[in-house]
Image (spheres, grey):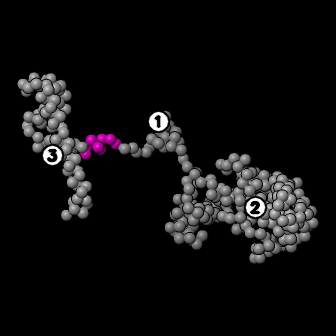
Amino acid sequence: MLIDMSTSRPGVPEDQIVDSTPDHPADRTTDQTNEQTVQQPADQAAARRPHDDAPDTAALFRRLADLPDGPERDSARDELVTAWLPMAHRIAGRFRDRGESIEDLRQVAALGLVKAIDRFDPDRGAFESYAVPTITGEVKRHFRDRMWALRVPRRVQELRNKVRVARRELTQNPGSPEPSVAAVAAHTGLTEEEVNTGMEALDSFSTLSLDAEMSTGEDGYSLADTLGAADSSYDVVVDRESAKEGLRRLPERERAILYMRFFEDMTQSRIADRLGISQMHVSRLISRSCARVRDEVLAERAGRRGKGPGAAAS
């Protein structure tokens, strides 16, 4: 992708985010424009600078290249960073209002500026022609790696960008219909499966709050209201079905006591009066019956787990 070398145009759209910081212009032997920039004399480049934040630091860069590691070199490097920092802030300003604070964007751009200063060779052209794409690439990489609400693999991010660009190109004429998956695949050279993956990732850059209103009427509801929840009644059904066989095996009098206690909601005193026994006896019978049924159910479940699915199937 050709990188906009102009520093006066607005920011590049988010869907054109590149994946890495560009190499030095002199290393791009196939790019005629960049070769012309490299071969351009430094004094001519300085005369054509359109911004006040592009200082003439050619002599300082040559001095930095000749200095060994040490305090003096660090001081010259800091001076260059201070001189070019306004340009880095201007580049960061192109990406404002995209979900990231301008302060964080300026920090990212400053990091790109430091990388550009460390990698720049003053014998290969003007610093601005190398710093602008380097800083821009650093900011775009920040959006690519840090701004996704839902993290997706880099391969999927690249598919998303290709699909977005293809859809925009296919619908650039007024009245153009929404391109089909097959049309996008033919335009990009991707498979239809890859196009579908990229289209699914289009909505992954941002997420929707669970409190978001799904209806504008008086009976409006949020997204959270549409989500299912665990139903405790399922556990009750399972327990009832498990206890059926154990209840059938109880003596008739104990089954009658449990029925009167738990289904007719009779007190132990009333049950005792009806059966002509003491309340303490009724309490012992209820406890013994429940413990018996519970132990049988637990033993049966333990036996099923011990046999495993293969043994149960056989």
Image position of 260 (left or right of 133)? left
Q: CA distance from mark 2 to mark 1?
A: 55 Å
- Look at the magenta stretch and give its main secondary structure: helix
**Badge 2, how many Cα within 10 Å: few under 14, some, many 20+?**
some
| Residue located farthest toward the bottom when viewing the structure as drawn | 30
Amino acid beneath label 3: Glu
Q: Tell me which residue sits at (66%, 64%) in the image.
A: 19
Residue 213: percent from left, percent from top:
52, 41
Marks 1 and 3, the one that precedes in the sequence: 1
Which residue, given by chain and number where applicable, does mark 3 sit on?
245
**Badge 1, how many Cα within 10 Å: few under 14, some, many 20+?**
few
Which residues are drawn in magenta?
231-238
Which residue, given by chain and number where applicable, does mark 2 sit on?
115
- Above-or-below relation of 140 to 96: below
Q: What is the secondary structure assignment of the residue under circle 2? A: helix
Q: What is the secondary structure assignment of the residue under circle 3? A: helix
